[in-house]
């Protein structure tokens, strides 16, 4: 009889989340779904790029002919759109050269990341991504007689042009992308009805203009009072990525979640903690509160940490893997931490790397895998080919993993008389088998056993594989069973899923739980990340 205890951590099970973002919507929805939520998507605005905008191109040519003293980059996506528009007109190389010659300042790490991605290092970077911080720093320097070009966010109505002009500067404005009407008005209307009917628990926002558009659409539908009622009772939560995005909600008297770090992952984590954590219900910022904003810093933005796992259809397995990166965020709140996959789930690792490079200029992929193999050598390697990206080694082998295996076996009730089998996923790559052998040797030493078949005085330690190598787990269990001892299997697997299901069917008496969740896995992930960052320095 198999005795298995699994911990399923789906903090958002039974919850419905409405995602309003247009950009990175699939990535956001996937993050919530991995935590058990059902997601809906309806964007209240569509971002319209200005690839053929005559005014944008005319202003760009003007800047090239008459360079400004300072260029202000307010968004990473805006800078990339500007470069795309310039490329379509045959001006990209000249624009990049201009950015490299004049003084460039960036609003927040995303703007800096987009600049670094084209080889431009800004003179300084604000930490908060607030326009007020950009204005404060430039106005303090004195702008009388200066020439300033501003790449604007969204509609351009951010107050920077007016503030700089009032201080005596010549201001040239570049609105690189504008917000347009929703791509699917019916989906927006349907989502508003679902929210009003109490069928949605959380509505997420990643930019201020869509917040205003969404609230205006609710008002046009006569739903304003209903939204206030739901939010006031706690039945509906508005989640944002930071104070700029939250401002329109607070101005209309609606409480909102405002994470300390302006990150998508931080928003997802805060939603989980608000709805299901030990401090549930205590995270809301209410109208009149002043959200804390990070002070300005010129420190370099660290590369995005991308935790890349295999992917699984098993919900408990998804939650276990997600818990590793949730723990990473708690241990290192300064990092932008994103999740990616090589199979089964989305987003794919190459897409996440591309997005991270565009946003921050650097990315380190940490394979949440226990050994080298096809996915590390092919999928991950291909994903980090672009400049600015790198990959660490997989999590295993490592002594921390041995420690976790020992703890799982003790939790399962292993005794000295039991026969022990170490079950690994397996790979046809000889290096993967060598890595498993190293872990097996470490586990045997920790338990005072010998690697090999059970003997008259020892339960031994046999190794079995799920695929790609021999012997397979059922054969190893059968060999251990021949000793007449109780057979216990140590699961050298990160999480529940396909291979763990096969281990459960292999005929052992007891199967220990997989490695995750365990905070030590986050510590190991960060160690792999830090090792790679140091090697790149």
Image: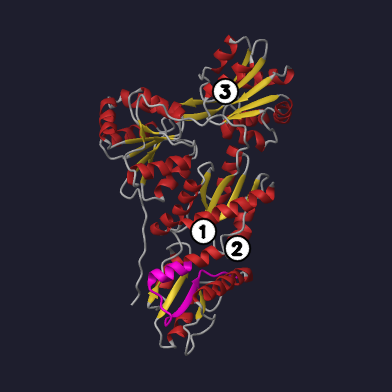
Mark 2 surroundings: few (<14), some (14-19) or many (≥20) residues within 10 A = some
198 horizontally vs 416: left or right: left
Q: What stretch is highlighted in magenta?
A: 405-428
Query: Taking the image as drawn, is residue 166 in sight?
Result: yes
User: Would you place residue 368 above or below residue 272 in this image?
Assistant: below
Comparing 212 with 485, the one in front is: 485
Comparing 15 with 233, the one in front is: 233
Residue 502: quarter of image:
bottom left
Q: What label does residue 310 carry, if any?
A: 1
Q: What label does residue 451 carry, if any?
A: none
Comparing 424 with 175, the one in front is: 424
> At x 56% / y 47%, what residue is drawn?
305
Question: Which label's residue is closer to the chain start, 3 or 1?
Answer: 3
> At x 59% / y 51%, what residue is drawn?
529
Question: Which label's residue is closer to the chain start, 1 or 2?
Answer: 1
* Residue 447 place in picture, x, y as percent: 49, 75
According to the picture, the residue beneath numbered tag 3 turns out to be: 134
481 horizontally vs 66: left or right: left
Question: Which label's residue is closer to the chain start, 3 or 2?
Answer: 3
**How far apart, in angstroms, are the residues tagged by discs 1 and 2?**
11 Å
* Residue 230 place in picture, x, y as percent: 26, 33
**How far apart, in angstroms, are the residues tagged by discs 3 and 2?**
46 Å
* Residue 233 place in picture, x, y as percent: 25, 34
């Amino acid at each position: 009889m198999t005795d298995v205890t699994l911990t399923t951590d789906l903090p958002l099970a039974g919850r419905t989340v409405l995602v309003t973002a247009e950009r990175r919507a699939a990535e956001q929805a996937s993050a919530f779904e991995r935590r058990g939520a059902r997601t809906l998507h309806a964007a209240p605005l569509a971002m319209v790029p200005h690839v053929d905008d005559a005014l944008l191109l005319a202003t760009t040519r003007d800047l090239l002919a008459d360079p400004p003293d300072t260029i202000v980059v307010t968004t990473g996506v805006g800078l990339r759109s500007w470069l795309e528009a310039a490329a379509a007109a045959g001006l990209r190389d000249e624009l990049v050269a201009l950015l490299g010659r004049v003084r460039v300042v960036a609003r927040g790490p995303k703007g800096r990341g987009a600049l670094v991605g084209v080889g431009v290092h800004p003179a300084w970077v604000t930490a908060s991504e607030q326009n007020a911080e950009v204005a404060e720093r430039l106005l303090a320097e004195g702008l009388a007689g200066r020439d300033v070009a501003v790449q604007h966010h969204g509609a351009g109505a951010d107050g920077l042009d007016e503030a700089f002009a009032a201080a005596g500067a010549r201001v040239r404005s570049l609105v690189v992308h504008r917000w347009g009407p929703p791509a699917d008005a019916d989906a927006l209307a349907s989502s508003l009805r679902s929210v009003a009917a109490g069928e949605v628990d959380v509505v997420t926002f990643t930019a201020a203009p869509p917040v205003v558009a969404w609230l205006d659409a609710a008002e046009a539908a006569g739903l304003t009072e209903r939204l206030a009622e739901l939010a006031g009772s706690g039945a509906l939560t508005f989640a944002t990525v930071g104070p700029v995005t939250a401002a329109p909600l607070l101005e209309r008297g609606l409480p909102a979640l405002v994470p300390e770090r302006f990150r998508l992952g931080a928003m997802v984590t805060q939603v989980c903690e608000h709805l299901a954590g030990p401090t549930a219900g205590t995270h809301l910022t209410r109208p009149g509160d002043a959200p804390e904003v990070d002070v300005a810093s010129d420190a370099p933005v660290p590369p995005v940490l991308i935790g890349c796992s295999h992917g699984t259809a098993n919900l408990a397995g998804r939650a276990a893997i997600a818990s590793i990166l949730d723990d990473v965020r708690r241990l290192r709140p300064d990092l932008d931490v994103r999740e990616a996959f090589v199979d089964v789930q989305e987003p794919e690792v190459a897409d996440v790397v591309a997005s991270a490079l565009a946003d921050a200029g650097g990315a380190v992929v940490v394979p949440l895998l226990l050994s080298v193999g096809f996915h590390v050598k092919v999928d991950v390697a291909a994903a980090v080919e672009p400049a600015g990206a790198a990959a660490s080694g997989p999590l295993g082998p490592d002594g921390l993993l041995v420690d976790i295996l020992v703890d799982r076996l003790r939790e399962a009730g292993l005794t000295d008389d039991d026969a022990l089998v170490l079950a690994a996923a397996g790979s046809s790559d000889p290096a993967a088998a060598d890595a498993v052998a190293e872990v097996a040797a470490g586990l045997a030493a920790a338990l005072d056993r010998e690697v090999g078949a059970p003997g008259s005085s020892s339960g031994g330690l046999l190794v079995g594989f799920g695929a790609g190598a021999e012997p397979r787990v059922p054969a190893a269990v059968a060999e251990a069973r021949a000793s007449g001892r109780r057979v216990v299997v140590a699961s050298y697997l990160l999480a529940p899923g396909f291979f763990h299901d096969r281990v459960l069917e292999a005929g052992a008496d007891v199967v220990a739980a997989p490695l995750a969740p365990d905070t030590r896995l986050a510590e190991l992930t960060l160690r792999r990340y830090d090792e790679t960052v140091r090697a790149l320095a």
